[in-house]
Image (spheres, rainbow, N blue to C red):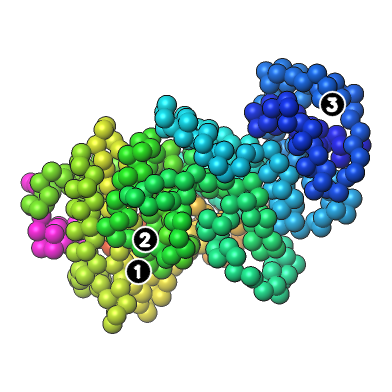
């Protein structure tokens, strides 16, 4: 009876969420039974009543729960059903196996891709935001977006001279089971899908080492005459964190078409921004093998930053250009003509790709290996197109083997990973290890027993010195969080190809005047 009860609770929850209608209950139940190998089903009294008479979605709360799913595993019917399947030996206890079954079950409740696309664009004709609201809610209700896991993340803001930086300690992605890792390594991958971003993941069952995607749906969007697939990130780092995937499996590349696609997307969805990781290792994102962009409905600190100064480009009289007041060098272009903006961005990219300034360690090539590229972000502001171009360089040397313009060794105890699009805009995605480690730092600062890591001790001693009269039980967490934010600011400063000191500012103006032939306003 326990399994039948969990199935029917999940059906009732899905009714309340609008995933299915009353007439779908028996069909959905039978599909779940088939997957679980059940050949009989006994309804409890409450479920039997609901099944016979049906019930309006507005009345369902009286029988089940709020329309919003309860992500607590003890009360969530899907979690309870998966756990029951484990206890009955239907599946193993590995996270990958649980996710595969959960995806298969939720796939019973959601429409096919063609129906999702039809529903999306019916709403889009009325209002683009209404369309994305529908798809975002569907992606949460189908459990494709891992809301339960995301709630584990630690999120806060830290005020700086550049605005409020976002800090996230990423606890949403569970650590891989060593047994599952060994099994995945021992199993030869069939090479389908080619990568985690390929469009062939839509509806893919999953396997050990490759995430379940049975309930995954994408919306087909035309970008500059090419079909791209719009989806949400399973582990959203900010509001409506979306991903646009190339329909073709091809490497990341920043070029003229990139700018056109980004601007075409924000034209169609003006309430979203869209950006791209850089296309070179170290300064790029984690997946460079598949061309993709990231966007969403969120305003980062970089987007709020104002201009330091403006400059004019004679070849592009209808494009306004400025340097943004941000730790990394950002050229902001604005205009009403998307094509002119894209052409201007392409001109800047081509000039930057070959630019050298040894006085600030900028070299465009080592032999035939390129180092200069751009991280671009597009949005619409007050009815005008806007493109932010963040100048990047991925060169290494003996002093900085992980990257000259990469987090330097003295901040690796907080952030060592690549600085991609999300970090560039002002959101630090920090490793899960910091949750426990920072708690030990707090204990150390209060002279309580702790297991502080050696690599945090110099930093902690520095905090003891500067906050000696302010360290209390009630203040210590905010102090540590503030200092983590200052470390992230240092990370952004390390990643800057032109520093914000006098030497760096002069070098950036030299690039504008000599390479871009721009006129800097007084």
Which residues are the magenta region?
Answer: 503-522
Tell me if label 1 and label 2 are in contact, CB under 8 Å: yes
Q: Where is residue 393 shown, x and y percent of the image?
A: 31, 66
Q: Is residue 104 left or right of residue 140?
A: right
Q: Which residue is painted at 55% across and 65% down in the image?
A: 194
Determine whether label 2 and label 3 are within 8 Å by CB. no
Earlier-in-chain disc, 2 versus 3 = 3
Could you say where residue 160 lies in the image, as x and y percent from the top left? 36, 44
**Residue drawn where x is 41% and y is 68% of the image:** 281
Q: Position of residue 407 (x, y in %)?
A: 41, 63
Q: Which residue is depicted at the point 30% across and 56% down?
A: 257
Q: Provide the residue designation for mark 3.
A: 47
* Residue bearing the label numbered 1: 394
- Secondary element type, mark 2: loop
Which of the two marks, 2 or 3, is nearer to us in this view? 3
Instruction: From this view, report whether residue 334 is shown above or below residue 47.
Output: below
Given residues 428 and 234, the one toward you in this image is: 234
**In this rendering, position of residue 431 left or right of residue 358:** right
């Amino acid at each position: 009876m326990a399994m039948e009860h969990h199935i029917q609770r999940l059906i009732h929850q899905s009714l309340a969420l609008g995933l299915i209608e009353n007439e779908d209950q028996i069909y959905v139940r039978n599909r779940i039974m088939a997957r679980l190998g059940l050949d009989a089903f006994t309804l409890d009294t409450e479920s039997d009543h609901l099944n016979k008479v049906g019930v309006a979605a507005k009345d369902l709360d009286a029988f089940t729960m709020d329309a919003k799913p309860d992500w607590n595993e003890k009360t969530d019917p899907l979690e309870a059903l998966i756990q029951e399947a484990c206890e009955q030996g239907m599946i193993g206890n590995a996270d990958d196996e649980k996710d595969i079954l959960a995806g298969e079950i939720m796939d019973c409740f959601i429409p096919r891709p063609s129906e999702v696309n039809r529903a999306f664009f019916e709403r889009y004709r009325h209002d683009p935001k209404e369309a994305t609201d529908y798809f975002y809610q569907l992606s949460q209700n189908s459990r494709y977006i891992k809301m339960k896991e995301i709630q584990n993340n630690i999120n806060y803001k830290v005020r700086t001279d550049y605005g409020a930086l976002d800090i996230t300690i990423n606890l949403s992605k569970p650590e891989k089971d060593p047994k599952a890792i060994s099994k995945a390594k021992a199993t030869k991958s069939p090479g389908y899908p080619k990568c985690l971003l390929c469009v062939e993941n839509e509806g893919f069952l999953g396997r050990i080492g490759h995430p379940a995607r049975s309930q995954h749906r994408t919306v087909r969007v035309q970008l500059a005459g090419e079909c791209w697939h719009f989806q949400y990130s399973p582990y959203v780092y900010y509001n409506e964190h979306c991903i646009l995937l190339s329909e073709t499996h091809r490497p990341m590349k920043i070029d003229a078409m990139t700018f056109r696609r980004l601007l075409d997307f924000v034209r169609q969805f003006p309430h979203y921004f869209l950006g791209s990781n850089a296309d070179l290792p170290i300064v790029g994102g984690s997946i460079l093998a598949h061309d993709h962009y990231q966007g969403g409905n969120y305003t980062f600190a970089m987007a709020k930053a104002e201009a330091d100064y403006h400059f004019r480009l004679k070849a592009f009289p209808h494009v306004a250009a400025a340097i943004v007041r941000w730790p990394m060098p950002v050229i902001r272009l604005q205009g009403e003509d998307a094509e002119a903006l894209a052409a201007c961005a392409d001109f800047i990219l081509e000039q930057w790709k070959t630019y050298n300034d040894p006085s600030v360690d900028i070299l465009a090539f080592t032999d035939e290996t390129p180092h200069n590229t751009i991280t671009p972000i597009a949005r619409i502001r007050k009815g005008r197109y806007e493109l932010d171009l963040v100048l990047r360089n991925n060169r290494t040397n003996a002093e900085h083997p992980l990257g000259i313009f990469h987090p330097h060794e003295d901040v690796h105890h907080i952030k060592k990973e690549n600085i991609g699009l999300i970090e560039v805009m002002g959101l630090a995605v920090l490793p899960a290890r910091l949750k426990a480690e920072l708690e030990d730092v707090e204990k150390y600062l209060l002279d309580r027993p702790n297991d502080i890591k050696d690599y945090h001790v110099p930093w902690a001693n520095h905090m003891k010195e500067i906050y000696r009269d302010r360290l209390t039980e009630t203040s210590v967490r905010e102090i540590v969080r503030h200092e983590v934010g200052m470390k992230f600011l240092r990370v952004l400063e390390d990643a800057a190809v032109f520093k914000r000191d006098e030497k760096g500012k002069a070098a950036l103006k030299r690039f504008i005047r000599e390479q871009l032939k721009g006129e800097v306003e007084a």
